[in-house]
């Protein structure tokens, strides 16, 4: 009995520590997202120019994907995660210091690069801890990420209402993150599952990994759009007062967080296929409502549905990837992310270019069409689970 209690406490300790790092990642990224419109104004960017600048962030993310998987496999997710937890918030502060547009582009590239190093290492940690529990808990980790995003936007909203400049706001976030790292780093899982020093730097995904990546792609197109353009959509299309520009983002993040805290239960009861199908339907429905009825209440309801829709998709496909029999967890997760995050790469800049040529509503309509890909690909979920 005593050994069982010790084992349970150890698992909980690892889970709490990893959850803290998910919180750090969400807090840092959402702090950037909620100040995009301020940075847009500071550099006098139109929608197309902003889309071009935002392109640098997912490019950095994509470039880092094979390197991240290799690094986590060689060094271990715990050590990589500690370094990323310290450096990622520093990149946020550097963005606030950018003196010109080209420096901003370079820093956004580095921000995206470090963000993905963080993501791959913390998801690899989560896969190892999930193996200790012997049941689905991945979505709850991502729920902490979303909860942190909600907190970050809340802090950002207060900062905006107080006319706080971007730099001191980002310095505050960096300080909070560093304190959290110092508090929790020693309790991370010390070793990963299935360590393999022979894994190549560039891993070619097999058929099941590619299918998971395509499902993630469909979801991340929408997620990237929500992160980078929700505030501008509410500002330009919904035409809300300045202090309500983050209302859509808050709505999206709140249901995204809530959905992730209950997703593991639904996956256990209904299976991956049904959960993914419902996710696609809710995502598309939310976007259509926001496009057809661009008013504060209806658009907010639409963004709430979008949050529920995308909440479980990425955690579910990453958890499946981490159980791959042909790749080490870090490399498999990176391979899925390589395919999936092309959606994150294409979404925000595509919105900028299309909205400049037509309108922001038309741009969101195209994202709604792409969101149906989640439902269409979900029919493969049962086969994918069996292949893992």
Image: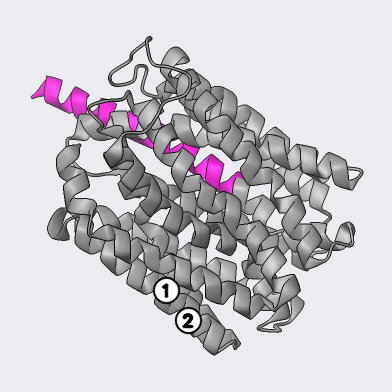
Q: Give the residue pinned by disc 1.
A: 284
Identified at 78% across, 37% down, the residue is 106
Residue 68 location (% of width, % of height)? 51, 26
Give the vertical position of 43 relative to 319 (above or below): below
Between residues 141 and 232, which one lies in front from this camera angle? 232
Instruction: Tell me where residue 99 appears, x and y as whole percent.
Output: 91, 43
Q: Quadrant of residue 329?
A: top left
Q: Residue at x 25, y 33 (%)?
A: 323
**Residue range corresponding to the magenta coloring:** 1-28
Evaluate if marks 2 and 1 touch, with contact meaning CB atoms under 8 Å apart.
Answer: yes
Horizontal relation, residue 141 to residue 159: left or right? left
Q: Position of residue 226 (x, y in %)?
A: 56, 64
The quarter of the rendered structure image containing the N terminus is top left
The answer to whether residue 5 is magenta is yes
Q: Secondary structure at mark 2?
A: helix
Q: For the point 54% across and 47% down, which residue is it?
A: 26
Looking at the picture, how far across and down is residue 241, in whole percent? 74, 81
Camera-nearest residue between 236 and 49: 49
Relative to 101, is 128 above or below?
above
Magenta region, mostly helix, strand or loop?
A: helix
Position of residue 224 in the picture relative to residue 37 (left or right): left
Query: What colour scheme does the image use?
Result: one colour
Tell whether position 277 is magenta.
no
Direction top: furthest residue:
197
Q: Which residue is mark 2?
A: 288
Q: For this view, does 342 lie left or right of residue 351?
A: left
C-alpha separation, residue under disc 2 versus residue under disc 1: 6 Å
Sort mark 2 into few (<14), some (14-19) or many (20+) by Cα contacts within 10 Å: many
State whether residue 255 appears in this view.
no
Q: Residue at x 48, y 39 (%)?
A: 338
Name the disc covering residue 107, or none: none
Q: Is residue 295 above or below residue 88?
A: below
């Amino acid at each position: 009995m005593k050994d069982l209690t010790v084992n349970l406490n150890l698992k909980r300790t690892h889970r709490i520590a990893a959850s803290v790092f998910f919180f750090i990642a969400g807090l840092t990224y959402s702090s950037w997202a909620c100040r995009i419109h301020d940075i847009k104004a500071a550099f006098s960017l139109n929608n197309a120019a902003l889309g071009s600048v935002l392109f640098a962030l997912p490019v950095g993310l994509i470039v880092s994907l094979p390197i991240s998987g290799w690094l986590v496999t060689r060094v271990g997710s715990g050590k990589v995660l500690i370094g990323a937890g310290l450096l990622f918030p520093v990149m946020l502060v550097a963005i606030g210091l950018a003196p010109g547009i080209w420096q901003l582009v370079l820093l956004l590239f580095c921000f995206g690069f470090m963000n993905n190093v963080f993501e791959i290492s913390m998801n690899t940690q989560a896969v190892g801890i999930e193996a200790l529990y012997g049941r689905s808990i991945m979505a709850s980790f991502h729920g902490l990420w979303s909860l942190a995003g909600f907190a970050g936007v809340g802090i950002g909203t207060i900062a905006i209402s107080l006319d706080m400049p971007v730099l001191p706001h980002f310095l505050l976030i960096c300080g909070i993150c560093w304190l959290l790292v110092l508090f929790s780093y020693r309790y991370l899982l010390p070793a990963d599952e299935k360590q393999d020093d022979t894994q190549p730097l560039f891993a070619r995904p097999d058929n099941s990994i590619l299918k998971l990546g395509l499902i993630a792609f469909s979801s991340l197109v929408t997620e990237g759009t929500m992160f980078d353009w929700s505030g501008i959509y509410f500002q330009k299309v919904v035409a809300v007062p300045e202090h309500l520009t983050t209302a859509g983002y808050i709505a999206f993040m709140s249901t995204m967080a809530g959905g992730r805290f209950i997703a593991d239960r639904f996956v256990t009861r209904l299976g991956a296929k049904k959960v993914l199908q419902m996710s696609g339907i809710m995502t598309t429905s939310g976007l259509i409502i926001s496009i057809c009825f661009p008013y504060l209440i209806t658009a907010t309801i639409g963004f709430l549905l979008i949050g529920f829709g995308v909440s479980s998709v990425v955690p579910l496909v990453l958890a499946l990837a981490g159980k791959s029999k042909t790749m080490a967890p870090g490399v498999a997760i990176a391979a899925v992310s390589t395919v999936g995050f092309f959606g994150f790469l294409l979404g925000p800049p595509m919105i900028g270019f299309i909205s400049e040529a037509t309108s922001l509503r038309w741009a969101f309509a195209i994202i709604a069409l792409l969101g149906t890909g989640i439902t269409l690909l979900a029919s493969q979920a049962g086969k994918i689970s069996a292949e893992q």
